[in-house]
Amino acid sequence: MTELHDPGMWSPDRLHPSSMGHHAVASMVLNTLKVPHVLEPRSPKPLPVKPWRQARAEDIVWARDYFVPWVVRGIRHESPTGGHSAKRPVAAPLKLPESPQ
């Protein structure tokens, strides 16, 4: 899973995979289960090299926007979801639209 070490595989919150990260995980799962598939590996574009100071400044912004609110919710014993609920809280089959014939 070394490809998941690339920052391009993660959303800005650094917790959830980006679409490319989801693609990579799906491919890995299918490979592990030995399920035939047609998913081709994708590689994120190389990120520009940033000076150390700029990278740390961006880390501070990330901590302010994502980490600190998460910690505060934990201290207050609030939901870690920040008040958001699941799109589909009950497991059920998805109903796909019928294709026109």
Image (tube, rainbow, N blue to C red):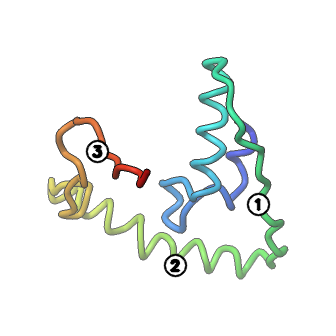
| Foreground: disc 1 or disc 3 | 3
Whichever of callouts 2 and 3 sits on the residue coming sooner in the sequence is: 2
Residue 12 vertical position relative to residue 61 in the rendered view, above or below: above
Callout 3: helix, strand or loop?
loop
Residue at 81% from the left image edge and 79% from the top image edge? 51
- Give the image location of residue 47, x and y in percent: 79, 70
Q: Can you tell which of label 2 and label 3 is closer to the viewer? A: 3
Residue occupied by mark 3: 95
For the residues marked 2 and 3, what is the alpha-carbon distance in whole angstroms?
A: 41 Å
* Label whose residue precedes the other's in the sequence (1 or 3): 1
The amino acid sitting under disc 2 is Val
The residue under label 2 is 61
Give the amino acid type for the residue marked by disc 1 in the picture.
Pro
Label 2 with label 3: CB-CB less than 8 Å: no
Q: Quadrant of the N terminus?
A: top right
Using a 10 Å C-alpha cutoff, classify the residue at mark 3 as few (fewer than 14 neighbours), some (14 to 19) or many (20 or more): few
Residue at horizontal 18 percent and vertical 54 percent from the top? 79
In front of the other: label 1 or label 2? Answer: 1
- Which residue carries the number 1 mark? 44
Amino acid carrying label 3: it is Lys
Picture quadrant of residue 9: bottom right
Q: Position of residue 75 (x, y in %)?
A: 21, 57
Who is closer to the viewer here, 26 or 85?
Answer: 26
